[in-house]
Image (cartoon, rainbow, N blue to C red):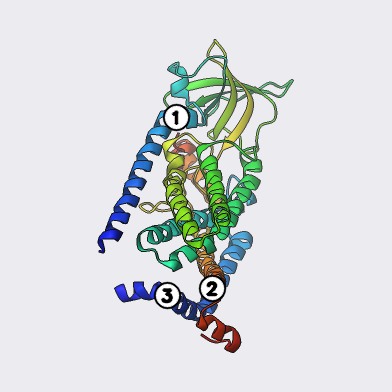
Amino acid sequence: MHPIRKKRLTIVLFLLVGLSVAVALTTYALRQNINLFYDPSQISAGEAPVDVRIRAGGMVEEGSVVRDPESLKVEFLVTDFNASVPVEYVGILPDLFAEGQGIVAMGRLNNKGRFVADQVLAKHDENYMPPEVANALEKASKAENKPMSGTAKPATY
Amino acid sequence: MWQFFHKLGSPKWFFGISTRFMPWLLAGGLLLLMSGVIWGLAFAPKDYLQGNSYRIIFIHVPTAFMAQSVYIMMASAALVTLVWRMKLADVFVKAVAPVGLILTFLALFTGAVWGKPTWGTWWIWDARLTSMLILLFLYGGVIALDRAINDEKSAARAVAVLVLVGVVNIPIIKYSVEWWNTLHQPATFKLTEKPSMPAEMWVPLLLSVLGLYLIFGWLACVRMQTEILSREQRTRWVKEFVTKGRV
């Protein structure tokens, strides 16, 4: 290669490497701000601040949803299969909200360790399947007496 | 190989050869894109959870994928501009930047339309959505910087530097869903694993991605030819092309 071109190529590569390192360090330092939500393990380990507007995310624990028959109040547990956090919310839930589904809730953690949400968003996972396949999977898992979540890979948090 | 590389440097040669490829790119692209989109929107099975609203992936995924691909192509061309000072590489960057801008906008827009019924919100500042918005601004910045500098050569270099600086955003977009907690789901398609989607859903998706690739190739050729004609308007071959209609 021509020496001038070689020199230019080296400069450009140095620029790119330096820039990547700078961006990597910055995003690493800011990772807590870039993370959209705290997961239940972080919250129960006390890493999440109390009484500050934060987001909490995870799976709605099977069989944990309790609806108040008088109002729109809902209580449920959010889990990452290591720890779970109780969440309470008053309002309309998104269509995809269900037990075993991922959600991201925005609200405040009170000093009793309960998360009081003012917004609940459904988090979709990367698995898609036709309804017939989902039904078949569910039947198969019921026949083997295994929970549904055993057939589909749980979403990563 | 090197001879091909040198020939690529000649705008006139590119003009001639691209004219021959373009009808094939357009015909193949339209065929693949139309069959992929029609199959996906009308015939592919519903999703068990989202019902019909998941069908937006047949537009969202191809546009988002292309928006990033186009940027990688632009960055490679920018490297060629800076190191080898090849004119055609700069022509490519200028020609495709607006195409990339539109693709990124479409990806963000279709994502928002899908996000409202699925997540419950149009927009959220999570890492994937934010890095994609940065990509939109990068495309806009490239176009604006190019327009702001009158001198062709200095514009080419400034734009190339900006494009290369912006390329660090591409791995951030790709891995944002793995490095951080985001509302956006992780990738359904991975190089090393089977897609977490049945074939009757991913085949039409693949067709529309390939189709959009070919359509992009055609669009890039059309826009590069226009740019070449305007840059080389004083040369003899362009005058001959205009009067005789042939290169």
Residue B129 visible here: yes
Q: Chain of mark 3?
A: B
Q: Are the residues tagged 2 and 3 within 8 Å (C-beta)?
A: no
CA gap, disc 2 and disc 3: 12 Å
Q: Which residue is mark 2?
A: B225
Camera-side residue: A149 or B13? B13
Whether B247 is drawn above or below B54: the answer is below
Q: Could you tell me which residue is drawn at 48 percent across and 32 percent down?
A: A34
Q: Could you tell me which residue is drawn at 50 percent across and 55 percent down?
A: B65
- Element assignment for label 1: loop
Q: Which residue is mark 1?
A: A30
- Give the mark toward the camera: 1 or 3: 3
- Give the mark toward the camera: 2 or 1: 2
* Tag 1: amino acid: Leu
Q: Which residue is mark 3?
A: B10
Whether B188 is drawn above or below B130: the answer is below
Say whether mark 3 and mark 1 are on the same chain. no
Say whether mark 1 and mark 2 are on the same chain. no
Q: Residues within 10 Å of mark 1 (few under 14, many from 20)?
A: few
* Tag 2: amino acid: Gln
State left or right for residue B191 relative to residue B206: left
* Tag 3: amino acid: Ser
Which is nearer the N-term, disc 2 or disc 3? 3
Whether B200 is drawn above or below B50: the answer is below
CA gap, disc 1 and disc 3: 46 Å
Picture quadrant where residue A150 is located: top left
Camera-side residue: A46 or A80? A46
